[in-house]
Structures are given as C-alpha cells and as structure tokens.
Image: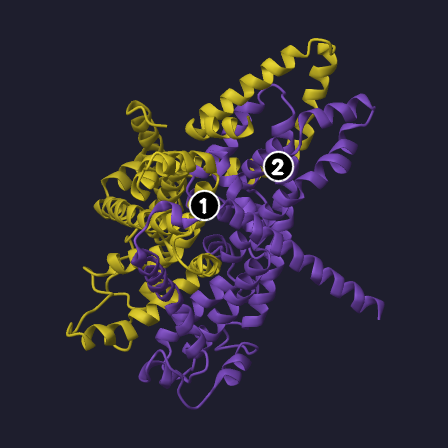
Chain colours: A purple, B yellow
Amino acid sequence: MSASTVSVSRREERRERRRQERLLEEAAQIPIKLYGLRRGTVSGLTALCFLFAIFTLIPIAWIVINSTKTQANIFETFGFWFARPFEFLQNFRGLFQDVDGYGVYFRWFGNTALYAVLGGVGATALATFAGYGFARYNFRGSRWLFYLVISALLVPITAITLPLYLTYAKVHLINSIWGMVLPSMVSPVGVYLMRVFVEVSVPRELIDAARIDGAGEVKIFFRLALPLMLPGLMTVLLISVVGIWNNYFLPLIIFSQNNLYPLTVGIGLWSERAQNSGNAQIFPLVVVGGLVTIIPLIALFLVLQRYWRSGLLLGSLAN
Amino acid sequence: MTAQTGKEQAVSSMATQTAARQAAQRRASAGRGSRPSGLRHRRDRRGIWFIAPFLVAFLLFMIAPLGYAIYTSLYTTKIIGGTTFSGAANYTQVLQDGSFWSGVIRVIVFGAIQIPVMLAIAFFFATIFDLGVAKFGRVFRTIFFIPFAVPAVVSAVMWAFLLEPQFGPFTHAASAVGIHNVNFFSSSLLLPSIIVIAIWEWTGYNMVILYTALRSVPRDVVEAAILDHASIWKIIWRVKLPMVRPAIVLLIFLNSIGALQLFTEPLILAYFDNSAVSVNYTPTLYIYNTAIGGSQYNLAAAGAVVLGVVIVAISVGSLVFRRRKGQV
C-alpha cells in the first residue's frame, strides 16, 4: 500500500519535472512567426526531417522484421515485410545455444554487461577524482599533465592495443577479463568532461569556505563537491558504458576463448561463420543477436536522455 | 557575465582557453594575498592525490603500451635467430609499402567526403530544431540520435544485409528503378557505401552536439537581429554559425581522428563479400592483418606508430593552418 503510494508520487514528480523542462524549452524558443517565413516552409522542412528519419529507421526496421524470419526467408522474401513462418521465438531460443562450437550469445551478453559495468564504474571514478584534482588544485606541472592526458586522444587505438596484447602474453592477462576491464578504465575524455563540469558547477568559494571551517580535503570532496558533480558523473558513466559496450578492437585482439567474448566480437565471428558454413542456420541468429544487442542501449539512452543532453552541452561549452 | 565569459571561451581554442583560465587562477590566488602562501601551496599539492589513481592507470595502459610499441618497432623477430635490433628497418618497410599508403590515402578521401557531408546534414537539422521551424522536433531529434546506440559491428552487419549484391533490398530497389546489376560491394562502390554507413552512424550524434551549441547562443542576440529585419538566412549564417564555429572545429577534429582509423565497417563487409576489401584496405586493417594474420608484430607496431604520426600531423597541421588564417 505505502510502497505503491510512494511510486505514484514519484511518477507524478517525474512527470512534473518533465513538464517544467518542456515549458522552459518552449519559453527559450523564439516564436517562428517573427522570422517571417513563407507558409509552406514549415511543412517542407518537416518533410525533410521525415525523409531523414526514414533513412535512420530503415536498418532498424529491417533488423526488427527479419529477426522473425527463417534463413531462407531473410534472403528470398521482401526485406521490409513479415513472412511466414513467424520464427522469432525459434531464433531467440538459438541465442541460448552453442552454435557450431562458436559460443553462446547470452554468455557474450553477460560478458559485455560485466565489462561495461566494471569498466564504466572504474572509468567514472578515476575521471571524477582526476577531473576534480585538475580543476580545483593548482600544483606544479598540473597544466602539463592535463595536456598530456588530452593529447592521448590523438594516439591510434592500434598503437595501444597491439602492445597491450604483446605484454598480456607475458603477464598472463591474455584471456583474462582484467585485460579488457583495466584499459577500459582509462578515459581521457571523461577526465576532460569532469574537469569542465567541476569548473562550471563547484564554486571555488564554497571549497575555500569549507576549508576555513576546518574541513579536510577528502571530506570536502565527498560531502561537498561530489553531490554537485553527480549530473556530470552520470554523463561520464553513460559515455564510458556505451564506449565499452561498443568496443570491438581491444576484445577482438586480446581474447582467444569464445566464452570471454563480448557481443561485438561474437556477432562479428558469427557473421563470418554464417558466410562460410553451408548448412547451419546462422544468419537468423546474427540478425536476432544484433537486435538484442542494441535494445538495452537504446532503452538506456531514452530513459536517461536528460543526462545525455547535459553532457553534450558540456562538450559544446568546453571548447 | 557568465554568458560573456562563455562566449569568450567559445571563440578561443581549447588550448588558449585553458591557458587563460590558468592565468586567471594565478591572478585570483595572487589577489587573495591575505592567505598565507605556504598553506596555499601545501593544499595545492594535495591535488596530486586526486589525480594519482587515474595517472597510474594512464601510465600503465596508455603511455607504457605506446612506449612499448615504439620500442618493439625498432626490433625484428625471426623464427631462426630470434629478436634483433634492426633500427629503422621496419619503418623503411612500412614507408616503402605502397599498399600502406594507398590505405592512408583511402581513409583521407573517406574523411574528406564523409565529414563535410555529415556535418552539413547535421548542421542543417540542428538549425531547424534550434529555430523550431519544423513540427515534431523533439521526436525527430530522438530518432536521429538512435544510431549512436548501435555498435559499429551491428551497423555494419545490418547495412551489409541491406546492400548485399544478390539479395539485398537496396540492390532490388536499384534494379526496380532501372539500375540493373549494381554491386554495392564492388571496388568502385565500396567506399561510397561505407561513407553512407558512417553518415548513418554519426550524423545524429554530431547533430545533437551542434544543437546544444546552437541553444547556448543568447536569445537577445537573435532578437536584436530580428529587430534589424535580418532574414532567417542571415541569422543562420551571420549570427548562429559564427557562434558555434568552435563546436564545429571540435567535431571536425574528433571525426577526423575516427575516420583515419576506419576499421570495423570494412572488416565486417569483407565477411559478406571479401572481393573488394583488400587486407590493406585501411591503415588499421593493414596493422591488424600484419599483426594477427601475419604475426609480424614488429612491423605492425611500426605501422601503428606511422599512423599515429599521420594523425598528429593532420590534426596539428590543421590547427596551425586555422590559426594562421586568423580563425579560432
């Protein structure tokens, strides 16, 4: 009883917040009448948006529709409509099975989730500490260090990943989840975003005031700065999780056991296998596997859109 | 005041802005002369402890591998004779390898077409949404952003099915409108196909960044322009575009770094039809195939270092070029 009341009031609260956001957005908008546009322009531009939306949705629609087809129907029937038999459940069940000894999809799904959560949390924590350190302390060499971190953006992934592979071979990190998780915790973009976010949202005066009151540096960080940094922290977490979820090159190189693969490597392997095997029905699995891969991320960003916006705004303010 | 500072920061480049901020910080701390300087200094140094955890990871998983890549690239491993120092031999081999350079030129052509087209589309829609001159702007913005959530592997798989030369719906559509026997994976159409895929993947993301940048243009500036009877085109070109130029520069920079490392899309397309995608199709594919396929790690490391130098040269070169032209 009380639990449901709480959830209802929270939902109302959320709806109210969303309404306010929309009102704010509308208030910031200059009425289009003032631009003196001709009457047809709005319809014409809406039509162009509609065309690009179709372009964007074509592959998504294709993957949804074809996840319900048999291998023969994927190739032989019209790509943008359903065909009998309706095989979605059959295809979906295939994701729990080991295909040709190449591995089980849902094992990969679990791996991806594990790498994304561990790596994402680690990257966010490191970036939050470092961003705060760079923004609010002015020690010798901090500027130089910051430039060094930012210039890491220019280094090609191959120049990092290949040597990692060679080193892992020596220290037994090949086929270890830490070989994937630990490098994922290094996020120069995260440090950059957190630094900018601290500059904007944690006033220097507030920290000075807390120091005068005798608070220690660690206490100031956790009690005072961290709550103010939460929206930026969420953004960095999202960016890191999506980055690791979509990462292909690093796991492709460092893993040789298919029970450690993330989704991206597994699907890549299946699509290669599907071409070369005559009898196995792998194409429907590639399609339904692709669909199941993108659903969690699309859901994640639809639910947390607010944080995306604030984070990207940061990116645009920052330069 | 804040908006003014924001604007000033926006017109300066990232580097100069940070420098200016540091200078301001120094001025600010010098201004507060009442505080004992020794205390200030001691406090400042504690910042290193906040940065240390990241720095350790950064050194271990970024700097050390990079250093090791450079080190390895100077050696040669042979089955008989083991590993020996070979100086610049690997570099000579990479630099003289025509297929490496044709890959480099291919990704430069790819970026030179894909990035401007994508940014033009992204800016066009960002402007439309910013001005509110199309209906259902929120819905369209959300739809356009969806591909960002799709891993490159899955995008490439979906597009490979759509463009497949025998069964693909796009191939059928082309023959339905009278273009028969079109092969999107042929050597002449492969790069344009990858460009379309990349535009599909990244336009929404770039659009959202440009949109947020456009939203931060102060309302009163636009209102003043309207009162001066500026047309909507003038407002877009003369008022809005100059104010989001830093965001555009940042996007060109980030997209270029990505484009030069093109890898996943051609690799996956090669699974579907490997006739057009050579093992050296892009520099990253060259490095990947040299290392993993050919086990020539030293040569691959040299390739990776050369690619890094190309990326740095292009980014720094364009930065210097812009500065000389007086922009940014």
Q: Where does the image place residue B167, in percent across and percent down from the top left?
A: 28, 78
What is the secondary structure assignment of the residue under circle 2?
A: helix
Please report, as a chain letter, where disc 2 is located: B
Residue name at image x 52 percent, y 62 percent: A298
Task: Please state, as top left, top right, bottom left or bottom right, where the N terminus of chain B lies in the image.
Answer: top right
Q: Where does the image place residue B230, in percent across and percent down from the top left?
A: 32, 37
Near-viewer residue (A5 or A84):
A5
Which residue is under mark 2? B54
Q: CA distance from mark 1 to mark 2?
A: 44 Å
Q: Where does the image place residue A114, in percent across and percent down from the top left?
A: 62, 59
Classify 10 Å Cα crowding around label 2: few (below 14), some (14-19), many (20 and above).
Answer: many
Q: Is residue A240 left or right of residue A162?
A: right
Task: Please state, as top left, top right, bottom left or bottom right, where the C terminus of chain B lies in the image.
Answer: top left
Near-viewer residue (A16 or B277):
A16
Residue type at mark 1: give it: Ile
Q: Which-is-in-front pick, marks 1 and 2?
A: 1
Classify 10 Å Cα crowding around label 1: few (below 14), some (14-19), many (20 and above).
Answer: some
Which quadrant holds residue B311? top left
Which quadrant holds residue B186? bottom left
Residue A86 shows in this picture: yes
